[in-house]
Amino acid sequence: MEQTFNNKQKLILLLKIFIPILITQLGLYSMNFFDTTMSGKAGANDLAGVAIGASLWVPIFTGINGILMAVTPTVAQLSGSGKIKDIPLSVIQAIYLSLLISIIILVIGMIAIDPILNQMKLTKEVRTISKHYLIGLGFGIIPLFIYTVLRCFIDALGHTRVTMMITLLSLPINIFFNYVLIFGKWGFPRLGGIGTGYATTITYWVILIVTLLIVIKAKPFNSYQLFRNYYSIQIKYWKDLLKIGVPIGFAVFFETSIFSAVTLLMSEYNTITIASHQAAMNFASFLYMIPLSISMALTIVIGFEVGAQRYLDAKAYSFLGISFAILLAFCTSIFLYNFKIEVASFYTNDPRVLELTAQFLLYAILFQMSDAIGAPIQGALRGYKDVNATFIMAFISYWLIGLPTGILLAKFTVLEAFGYWVGLIIGLAVGAVTLFWRLRYIQTKKFKQDAEISIA
């Protein structure tokens, strides 16, 4: 990371950080895509079992991952302020915290997995596959969360290309072990959908080992000497991380779980409607990787500038990132409007599903515009370490405004299933507008603090 002096330099640096993050996010998205499609090749029960298991795991993973994302603004601000010696201690404390969280998740999983699955109306085969898929995945929780901490450390220093390369390395590893474990190739047992859980675990261990080697051996990370000194557990640092991380985790959880809730509510409609909704939502999630990646890039650059107390530069990055996201959303919206049938054909050949998916994709255009404002603002606020407003607004906008509005529109208007999408769009828009004013308030507050310090 380095200081920039004009908007051109800022845009170049933002792009250098954003593009590898986008490729990384698309790589992670692809991993889930291959898990699903390859399980489907093994059979309908395998596909259903993996889908159920993933639906239970993803909200938990994204929530916990959000907590550990506190490492990014913490390290970025320490780097910007020149407090380099404090970085190793903060990262090691985050690793300790990730180990504790991993153990808690594993214990809860051992106790709760059977009661939860038994409450669902699943066939014995699907229930068994779901359970053992989650068990297989459980062996990878510890390396996954440690890797998340190290990834945030690397990204916070501006070296997002490194984590991009690690993610790209993980894809062929995951696909290979999916292939040999799902279908029982080259002497491996044929595990069906269960094999994706173990394949994912193997992948997590490999990328953790690779990341550790990079952090220990490669420049500039080896200069921080993360593992050279022993650090005892220091609750103060845990409190600081949790103070930032817990609101981030809950905000991400509220955001991901609302879409699961809508999918469950969609079960009252026919199979064609459900399939069309799922296909359109899948592509909308794919496009969301763009504003999400801009959001993550803004957290890094703004955290760096705030740490250096260059608040004018931090503000410039905020509006540069938001403007860039809106421009890209405008481009993807034009693409989606003109090629909605072609996009829908990626998911189905059924003419009825094709037509309805195309209609849902029109609503996805409005998703893009709301996300283009809301997601970057969330990233900017995290760069300022202002996370409570995002957490509160995620709950209010999604669960108190978006979902109830969607239910009312679906139940009592001609929109029917589309009503849920309109409700989500309204919730996203309310959240985006509210967070925009929060960002303006934080920026004004920082300027006043800076002026008072200068006068003193």
Image: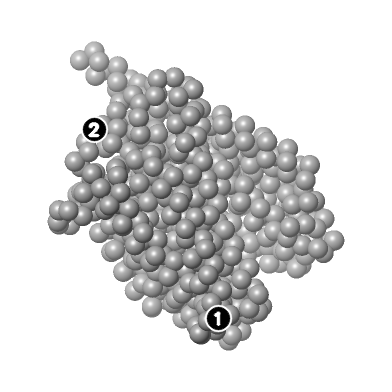
Quadrant of the frame with the N terminus: top left
Q: Is residue 122 above or below residue 5?
A: below
Q: How is the image coloured?
A: one colour
Closer to viewer: mark 2 or mark 1: 1
SS for dot 2: loop
Q: Residue at x 24, y 13 (%)?
A: 455
Q: Is residue 450 above or below residue 18?
A: above
Judged left or right of residue 411, residue 234 is left
Q: How many marks?
A: 2
Q: Is residue 95 above or below residue 73?
A: below
Q: Is residue 319 above or below residue 202?
A: above
x then y, percent, for residue 412 = 74, 54
Judged left or right of residue 426, residue 256 is left
Q: Which mark is residue 82?
A: 2
Is residue 284 visible in this depiction of the protein?
yes
Decide: few, some or many residues near mark 1? Use Cα within 10 Å; few <14, some 14-19, many ≥20. Answer: few
Q: Residue at x 63, y 37 (%)?
A: 329
Rendering quarter of residue 346 = bottom right
Which residue is outermost to the top?
A: 455
Residue type at numbered disc 1: Lys
Judged left or right of residue 357, residue 442 is left
x then y, percent, for residue 62 = 46, 57
Q: 328 and 9: which one is in front?
A: 9
Q: Residue at x 46, y 49 (%)?
A: 164
Decide: few, some or many residues near mark 2? Use Cα within 10 Å; few <14, some 14-19, many ≥20. Answer: some
Quadrant of the frame with the C terminus: top left
Residue type at numbered disc 2: Gly
Residue under pointer 1: 185
Residue at mark 2 to residue at mark 1: CA–CA distance = 52 Å
Q: Residue at x 40, y 58 (%)?
A: 64
